[in-house]
Amino acid sequence: MKQHVVSALVENRAGTLSRVSGLFSRRGFNIDSLTVGETEDPSVSRMTIAVTGADSVLEQIIKQLGKLVDVIAVRELDSASCVRREIMLVKVGIDEKTRPGVLEVVSIFRSRVIDVSPATITIEATGDISKLESLLLLLRPYGVLELARTGLVALERGSAVLTESSVSQVPVLSISN
């Protein structure tokens, strides 16, 4: 089975999330990650849904999602043609001996320390899933005390835009010196 990323524009109103996620669960898909946020239009939200399952079943789910009244547009995002990111906050236990090692790992992964106490460091990291998993792998020996992840967000690369009329091409602005 393969991981898929589905992007959907939906009406920003009560019950929409329940109806959309219900379609996945009724078909036996486990939702690995689900993020929802308002778009540039406050009446529209973007859902980014990461799921693992068979291609044929996902195709049916996308067709059924497209028929829901609340769904404006829906499409699977190909991993080769989209930008995927996630934010992770991780609190690590430290002492005077381990602090330099944790700070070095934070620096290597271009992450940020956002809170410090005598016994802990809280780190903010942004990136693709493999980067965050690699960071966690190096932090675990120090003692991960808490972890929070936003879930995946994704947009297509280039001028492709998810709209009601499927994909529209917008002009690419060129900035010259």
Image (spheres, rainbow, N blue to C red):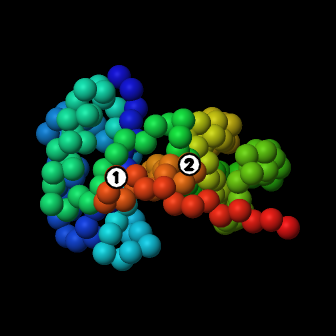
Q: Is residue 132 visible?
A: yes
Q: Nearer the viewer, residue 12 or 109?
A: 12
Q: Is residue 12 above or below residue 168?
A: below
**Residue drawn 40% across and 32% down?**
3
**Residue drawn 58% across and 43% down?**
128
Q: Which mark is residue 94?
A: none
Mark whose residue sits in front, 1 or 2: 1
Mark 2: which amino acid?
Arg
Mark 1: which amino acid?
Ser
**Residue drawn 32% across and 57% down?**
165
**On the rendered structure, is 21 left or right of 84?**
left
Q: Is residue 32 visible?
A: no
Q: Nearer the viewer, residue 166 or 66?
A: 166
- Mark 2 neighbour class, 10 Å CA radius: few under 14, some 14 to 19, many 20 or more: few
Q: Nearer the viewer, residue 19 or 171?
A: 171
Q: Give me the C-alpha separation between circle 1 and circle 2.
A: 15 Å
x and y percentages locating residue 76 in the rendered image: 37, 41
Assign the N terminus to one quadrant of the image: top left
Assign the C terminus to one quadrant of the image: bottom right
x and y percentages locating residue 85 in the rendered image: 55, 50
Tell me where residue 130 sits by quadrant.
top right
Question: What is the tally of numbered marks visible in this picture?
Answer: 2
x and y percentages locating residue 67 in the rendered image: 15, 51
Q: Is residue 177 above or below residue 52?
A: below
x and y percentages locating residue 31 in the rendered image: 31, 42
Q: Is disc 1 placed on a helix, strand or loop?
A: strand
Q: Is disc 2 placed on a helix, strand or loop?
A: loop
**Mark 2, residue position:** 157
Q: Which mark is residue 166?
A: 1
